[in-house]
Amino acid sequence: MQNVDNEMDRPSDKPEGFKARLRWGSAKELETFYVNHISVTRTENEYYIIFGELPMPIITLGERPPEELEIIPKVRLAISPGAMESIVGVIQSVFGPAIESEEE
C-alpha cells in the first residue's frame, strides 16, 4: 500500500512563525471497512463524505432480481474546505499517473 502524507492545513491557517513537525500516531487500532460506493455533499463550512458498501445480492434461478438495492453506509467524514483541497490534490497525484499509464 502506498502511503502519501500531505499537510492538510493551508499556510494561511497557521499563526505567523509557527513551525511544528507533524507525526502520524499508530493506526493499528482503527477499524477497517470495505467500501465500494461514495457520496459527497457540501455545506457552507464543510464537505461530508459517506463511504458505503453495496453487497452483491444472491439471486437463485427462477427468482426475480430485486428492484432496489441498498448501499450500507460504513463511515462519514466531515472535512474542512482546506483539508478537502489537500485530499483532492493527494488523490490526483496518486491516481493520475496510474490512470494515465492504463490509457497508454
Image: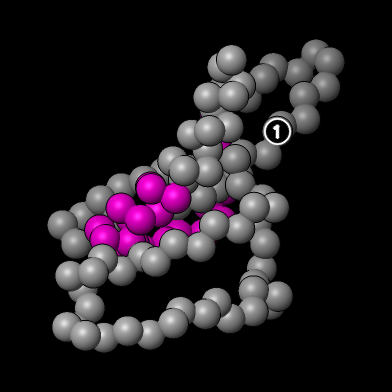
Identity of the residue drawn at 66% across and 68% down: 31
Say which amino acid is labelled 1. Met
Which residue position is annotated with label 1?
A: 56
Q: Quadrant of residue 27?
A: bottom right
Relative to 25, 8 lies left or right: left
Horizontal side of residue 88 vs 5, given as left or right: left
Label 1's element? loop
**Image: magenta residue range:** 68-90
Coordinates of residue 42 in the picture (x, y in percent): 25, 51
Q: Position of residue 30 (x, y in %)?
A: 64, 72
Quadrant of image for the C terminus: top right
Residue 71 visible from this viewpoint: no
- Kindly identify the residue that appears in the image at 48 percent across and 34 percent down: 96
Depth check: give the residue in front, 83 or 97: 97
* Residue nearest the observer in this picture, 83 or 44: 83
In this view, the residue in front, 59 or 19, is 19
